[in-house]
Amino acid sequence: MRFAETLKLALDAIRAHKLRSFLTLLGMIIGVACFMIILSALLGFNSYVDEKIAGIGSNTFTIQRFNFDDFKDTDSINEAQRRNKELTMDDINFIRSRMQVIDKIGAKAGGNRRSIRANGQSMDDVSVDGAEPVIGEIEKIDIKEGRYFSQVENDAGARVVFIGTDVVDKLFPGQDAIGQHLSINGIPYRIIGIRTAKGTVFGQPQDSFVQLPLKTFGTDFGGFRGGRYLYFEGTAASDALFNDAADEARVLMRLRRQLSPGDKDTFAVVTPDAISGLRDSIFGPIMTVILVVPTIALVVGAIVIMNIMLVAVTERTREIGIRKSLGARQADILKQFLVEAAVLSAVGGSIGILIAYLGGLLITQLLIPTRIPWYAAAIAVAVSAAVGILAGLFPAWKAARLDPIEALRAD
């Protein structure tokens, strides 16, 4: 029997029992859909992290007060708060006066959320931070309109701002925002630039921000203490010098803090590799879980497929007898039922992928971009078909070994 004919018989059998086929495939559908949704979310998150690292620069490091390990438990947090002093402008000036391998380094201040006003409209919970002009070069900021701060504006404490597109859409709809003013705490600031939109991540908008020159920020918001924390971003002249630049930053900070060789760092130098390592340590166990959960669903689905195929053999005993009496071999009967089981299971896998695709679109809208690679979808369908073949092996073998005379006597 040709494969095309066998495939047609398998599809006819599935169409003849639509509801039973769907219920049979429910475990397979759920297993594949769960696996693909979680996988697409993880791949999307990994791509997002890699994109952010690439956007900032693979040869860019951050100096901040705390390290990732400082947040592993309450005792570590308390110890780090006692041990690690807040960064100051004296720290970055110390580095600038002695750096050799570091190419550029700049300070930023964050942790400030305020209400802003313009054109009789207000916008709450806007991120207000400060940055030195060199940050625009270090972060390779993508400017939609206008420009970034100049060193002259920062040194003079000029009241100018660089804003996100959400601020423009809310306070200046249909208008040219460049050159207009917005107010924070009653103080007016002139808009000089707008960043290209970045969308949302985990439901949090990335374009609802106002950025001031760092000196202006420190003057207007009471310095860099408490919630208004300072951190530094630095870069090397090339990828080859990156590790040397990060090491130089660490050595200079230790000198600045007068730490002995055996003392633990009272600051953190965070590199892209550290960020990737943190991501892998968090999501590594999740990958194990997403392999276990669908596997259980696939096993359950395989058991259901086997039971249904055994029922199908019983229902079609007379058909098998007629086919054998007309010359069908055991191999033909075996192939027919195996193809039917494989097609049934592959259809379930395909439906699961479709559900995962729709779920991925929803996750992309609400949380983070998702990604389903074509090879992952192909592997999922292939695995589904393989599970179907294994599940249908015993029923197919049983059907192939039926005695034609006894089969013809069946009701």
Image: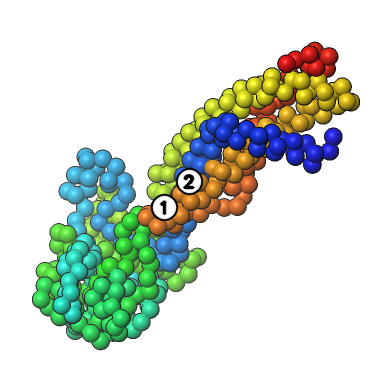
Quadrant in which the N terminus appears: top right
Q: Which residue is mark 1?
A: 363
Q: What element does badge 1 sit on? A: helix
Q: What element does badge 2 sit on? A: helix
Q: Quadrant of residue 306?
A: top right
Q: State whether residue 301 is above or below residue 261.
A: above
Can residue 320 be seen at all in this image of the molecule?
yes
Q: State whether residue 313 is above or below residue 183.
A: above
For marks 1 and 2 on the same chain, the one whose residue lies earlier in the sequence:
2
Q: At x 12% / y 78%, what residue is drawn? A: 187
Q: Name the residue nearer the viewer: 409 or 355.
A: 409
Label 2 Cα neighbours within 10 Å, binned few <14 / some 14-19 / many ≥20: many
Q: Name the residue nearer the viewer: 97 or 295.
A: 295
Residue flagged by tag 2: what amino acid is it?
Answer: Ile
Residue flagged by tag 1: what amino acid is it?
Answer: Ile
Residue 186 in percent (x, y) is at: 10, 76
Identify the image's colour scheme: rainbow, by chain, secondary structure or one colour.
rainbow
Cβ atoms at labels 1 and 2 below 8 Å apart: yes
**113 on left or right of 195:** left
Q: Which residue is mark 2?
A: 37
Task: Find residue 26 and name its label.
Answer: none
Q: At x 75% / y 15%, what residue is drawn? A: 410
Q: How many marks?
A: 2
Q: Name the residue nearer the viewer: 327 or 367.
A: 327
